[in-house]
Amino acid sequence: MKETLKIKVEAPIYTVVSDVTFAQVDTWFGHTRRDLKMDIIYPEDNTRKYPCIVWICGGAWAVMDRSAHLAYLSQLARSGFVAASVEYRTTNEGPFPIQLQDVKAGIRYLKAHSERFHIDVEHFGVMGESAGGYLTAMAALVDDKAYDVGAFTEFSSKVQAACPWYPPADVTVFSYPSAEKAAATPESLLFGKNVALYKEEAEKICPVTYVTKDAPPFMIIHGRQDKTVPFTQGELLHDKLEAAGADVRLLVLEDADHADVRFFQEEIWQRIIAFFRDKLGTGKE
């Protein structure tokens, strides 16, 4: 049997580029340097510019794998975005703010190479889970040149929309059995000090501290049954943003625990796509 098809071209080819070096940072006690990498999924389309969504992996700021969710990020790309997943240094390499500096360096790299990847530099979103949700919120809320270090500082690291999943929003209100046990928690390792003993100083690393009415639009997603980052953390960030007059919504997943399979269902991803389309548009000719 022979069949001839005449195919109408309605979508571009999508290309995955892995292991893109976007920055070099000090390592091994400052004696050596290493590359920070990102993965990028972009359309081979010279006719228009696409909004870009930067993904930030979770892992208690201690471990991360930028490639773990490429299957889902490809869905974002095929829905009209450039999708990029950035690496950041973990707490065994140093405390805050290096994690935020790395994320911002990734955003600036993408803007500096916007022509190569067909990116609309005026429409950037950021999204991440858990520790990555925290960095999503911080990247969206913290507009301070002190965190823009390294290359491509002529470009802004500002974003226009944020979607943090189950984010630690205020580490000073976490409940600990004792100050001694608080010392070994992910929050204290991120801070570089015991958050239970230095609460006032720890406010400087909390997303809620940086909330203003000028915050970009937020869609926070949190499971009500979260046993790792309490649901009250996502709720607190929502309430602070709402009280400030910012554009914010909170999606509550009724039966979901931390990093639950429910976050990876089609209904949630269609909500995410709709949010970013609404806030970032679909690109420009």
Image: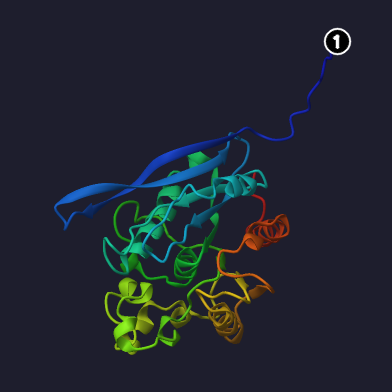
Its colouring scheme is: rainbow
Give the residue pinned by disc 1. 1
In this picture, residue 253 sits left or right of residue 213? right
Residue 247, by quadrant, is bottom right
Residue 278 % position (x, y) = 69, 61
Q: Relative to 113, does residue 124 appear above or below in the rendering?
A: below
Q: Quadrant of the N terminus?
A: top right
Residue 146 % position (x, y) = 31, 68
Q: Quadrant of the C terminus?
A: top right
Q: Residue furthest top?
A: 1
- Tally the numbered discs: 1
Residue 244 % position (x, y) = 57, 85
In this picture, residue 104 sits left or right of residue 161? left
The reply to whether residue 50 is visible in this rendering is: no
The reply to whether residue 66 is visible in this rendering is: yes
Q: Relative to 175, does residue 128 appear above or below in the rendering?
A: above
Q: Amino acid type of disc 1? A: Met
At a point 29% along the width and 55% down the height, the residue shown is 150
Residue 170 % position (x, y) = 45, 81
Q: Relative to 265, does residue 193 appear above or below in the rendering?
A: below
At a point 57% along the width and 74% down the height, the residue shown is 226
Residue 178, by quadrant, is bottom left
In this picture, residue 175 sits left or right of residue 273? left
**Secondary-structure class at tag 1:** loop
Q: Residue furthest left?
A: 31
- Label 1 Cα neighbours within 10 Å, binned few <14 / some 14-19 / many ≥20: few
In this picture, residue 86 sits left or right of residue 281? left
Q: Which of 234 and 44 lies nearest the eye of the viewer?
A: 234
